Image: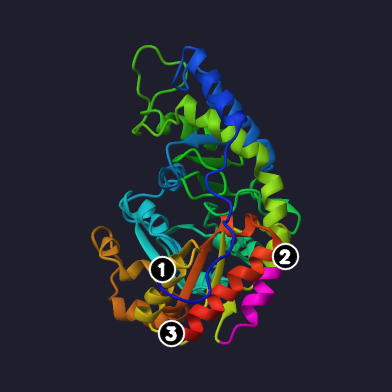
Amino acid sequence: MSKGVRLESELPGWPQYDDAEREGLIRALEQGQWWRIGGGEVDAFEAEFAAAHGSPHALAVTNGTHALELALEVLGVGAGSEVIVPAFTFISSSQAAQRLGAVAVPVDVDPGTYCVDPAAVEAAIGPRTAAIMPVHMAGQMCDMDALGKLSADSGVPLVQDAAHAQGARWRGQRVGELGSVAAFSFQNGKLMTAGEGGAVLFPDAEGYEKGFVRHSCGRPRTDRGYFHRTSGSNFRLNEFSASVLRAQLARLDAQIDTREARWPVLSRLLAEIPGVVPQALDERGDRNPHYMAMFRVPGITEERRARVVDTLIERGLPAFVGFRAVYRTDAFWEVAAPELTVEELARRCPHSEALTRDSVWLHHRTLLGGEEQMHEIAAVIADVLASA
């Protein structure tokens, strides 16, 4: 263990649970049907999640990556098409397109919010562009005004990667009220979780029905004769996970309120540390669930940043290095790669390049702590950077 300032008090744990999850699991167990066809938990969760996010239709699926893949497939994305994605994001954003045989086209992000730059998106739209995928990074929603206009003008649909954005709002509108498909993740670290899981919001019944059939092996809900209507896969969520997610959803708003109160304190303290720049907020995103507490250390090397994160972990903070630009992974080049080199993409994405080297994030459970803990967290970070 390294010497120096350490976190004095224990942060809240994650995942959080209580009797609501226990009761839900027993309810799912005792209903006698453990998959969604015949059970009631998945249907109930879909209705509750859709209502909470202002959408007419929600489809629960196995995980967030499948949610993205299914959303793109319903919109007709496939071999020969392109999907514009931010270069700075988790690899699922690009892999969902590539798994369908489409080419993921990475574009740069805003250096302050870390969300996709609408000007870069506009420059990348071409005759093969089938979808634009904005990623609401760490809960900060992308510029949905500019992206919505781009989508309307070009005729290219948006697929919101809302894996970090449960409960988020843009100028008073919830994710499901923005008129486009949106995909969510319920992986273990997310703002609400069942270990794994995902959901897709559809603005229309037609999209939902297409999604349902494809997520259930191409089989309509009422089929008893194995008349598989279209190609698909098994992306169905089970009843136990849905029961847990119903309990998680019920406490989401209160947790967001706490994180919304804590981030301004921590952000101000981080900004006072020499060399630290916290993630900027676009005030039009008027409800931010703060999936991560993110900051940059401009000028730091990737190797030194890794040592800093290791030391933060030793001192009691759940810290992580930032995402690697998708084109700087071997996986990105394995299938359906663009006709560009890493060097060419790097020149087009200078901000994503910098974030690959210098960004750090803390798990959102840090923002569920007390206000005094925000001071402790900042003191640890200041000491580690000063002594690194």
Q: Tell me the element at label 3.
A: loop
Q: Which residue is mark 1?
A: 106
Q: Is residue 299 visible?
A: yes
**Nearer the observer, disc 3 or disc 2?**
3
Q: Which residues are magenta?
A: 265-274
Q: Residue at x 43, y 85 (%)?
A: 300
Give the structural element (helix, strand or loop) at label 1.
strand
| Neighbourhood count class around disc 1 (C-alpha, 10 Å): few under 14, some 14–19, many 20 upward | many
Q: Residue at x 45, y 87 (%)?
A: 299
Query: Upstream in the sequence, badge 1 or badge 2?
Result: 1
Q: Which mark, by number, is residue 300?
A: 3
Amino acid under disc 3: Ile
273 within the magenta span: yes
Disc 2 marks which amino acid?
Arg
The amino acid type found where label 1 is placed reads: Pro
Of marks 3 and 2, which one's residue comes earlier in the chain? 2
Q: Position of residue 54 (x, y in %)?
A: 69, 42
Query: Image point 37% across, 56% down: which residue?
Result: 81
Which residue is labeled 2 in the image? 284
User: On the image, which quarter does residue 331 sit in?
Assistant: bottom left
Nearer to me, 384 or 91: 384
Dots 3 and 2: beta carbons under 8 Å? no
Task: Give the mark nearer the N terminus: 1 vs 3.
Answer: 1
Is 321 positioned to the left or the right of 45 in the image? left
